[in-house]
Image (tube, coloured by chain):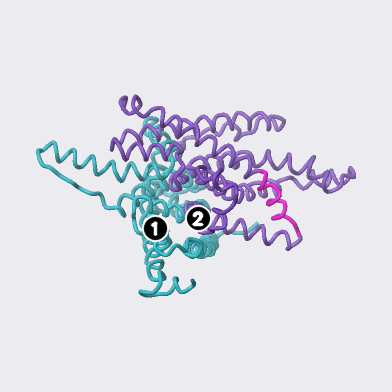
Chain colours: A cyan, B purple
Amino acid sequence: MWDLLQYGDQGYGDELIRGALYTLMLAASSVVVGVLIGLGLASAKLAQTPAIRRTAFGFTAIFRGVPELLIMLVVYFGVGIAINKLVGLIGYESRVEVDKFAAATFALGLVFGAFSSEVFRGAFLAVPKGQIEAGLACGMSRRQIFFRIRMPQMWRFALPGLGNLWLILLKDTSLAAIITYDELAREARTAAENSGESFLLYGAAGVIYLVFTAVSMVATGRLERWADKGVRRA
Amino acid sequence: MLEVIDTYGWRLVDGLWTTIELVAIATVLGFVFAVPLALARVSRNPLFAWPAYAYVFVFRGTPLLIQLFIIYYGSGQITAIQDTWWWPHVREYWGWICGIIGLTLNTAAYTAEIVRGGILGVPHGEVEAARACGMTTPVLYRRIMLPRAFRIAWPAYGNEIVFLIKGSVLVSTITVLDLMGQARSVFSRNLDLNTYVIAGIMYFVMIYAFDKGWRAIEARINRYLGERPDAKRKVVPEPA
């Protein structure tokens, strides 16, 4: 039974490892998109115009209150349908299929962005006001204050929250299996269906996810300590 | 959009009901399971603390999807189940049962951590006061620690239930026709994206209503603490 996990033609070891790599790729690209969206939304929430603030809060509420899978399905099918319709308007017949990786990245990025915008907002507000005043007193422009004072210090406050979101994201990548992106959960499923050994193969996939989680927990702990090194401990 | 509601509306409502049922049962069972788990987790006896930690680590460290697959497809691999006298009676609902088991085990792990956080958050002075009054440990837990811990953990627990509602969509992958399952089945027939949009609105409204109700209860059970500065969770826009 265990030889099913072998590397090579005999077992599913290589498929699982490839799936694991695809999972990591998806998680990594989603986190980049998510952080960008999150930063954008956080600045919108801190903007002076009420309309911008309200839009950003509404956006967050929607993407936090709707299941991730549903968002992924709408992005995956919706973008394709929209493109085909647009092309149809010009008079061409089209059968565009949206790239699964791109759709999954975008969907997970939207969700990560909605959650992380609250983390970033809190982190920006946590930077002491005195420092901003000090910056103004030194004659810095708003932009300089943002990039030299607020942004670098914000990360320290944001890290613990982002670490949690990363752990959630890592597990949410498994949803991409449902739009048939070949990540770990889907490879495990294919292998389990072919071999009939569900416990073994889903178990193996579970262990890989656990390893990812464990490594991430150690890494974020280190990162937080590194970010805090300039801070006096009480 | 109206035609989707017209033709398939009842199916979505049917699915919504299944979702509510699943979440309600899994929340109650998960909570019953989580409290002893949390107590084991804060126990000084490693014989209790370690297995509880391992349980929480495994269920929080793997995707719910994988957990559901292991339970559903794994149980299909055990042929002994199909030979039992009760199998013909439950076979039709097997996906539903596996969904309940999966959601319960999963939410129990998260809830245990939340309850643990609540227990650790009980002010030390209150515990000392209870001890000084001569309370034994079981009485202390029943009268002081747990009621206090639940009030502290209430907001975080509400978040967990929201995550459970959102996570429950995954039971649609193991043949359960919850709201998501119905939406996917309808979409595979009409290929109308509005189906998903309507399902999304239904989930959103459900979660929104739950959140409102939960906060109202929070305000009530924490009333004795008086007006707290963060009680209204008002968003303070940053000064210019």
Element under disc 1? helix
The reply to whether callout 2 and callout 1 are in contact (CB within 8 Å) is no
Q: How many tags in the picture?
A: 2
Q: Amino acid at mark 1?
A: Arg
Q: Are marks 2 and 1 on the same chain?
A: no
What is the CA distance from the residue labelled 2 to the residue labelled 1? 18 Å
* Residues packed near mark 2 inside 10 Å, few (<14), some (14 to 19) or many (20 plus): some
Q: Residue at x 64, y 49 (%)?
A: B112
Q: Say which of B103 and A164 sits in front.
A: B103
Q: Residue at x 40, y 63 (%)?
A: A191
Give yes or no for residue B137 being in the magenta stretch.
no
Magenta extent: B32-44
* Subunit that carries the residue with mark 1: A
Left or right for A159, reference A33:
right
Q: Main secondary structure of the magenta part?
A: helix
Give yes or no for residue B35 being in the magenta stretch.
yes
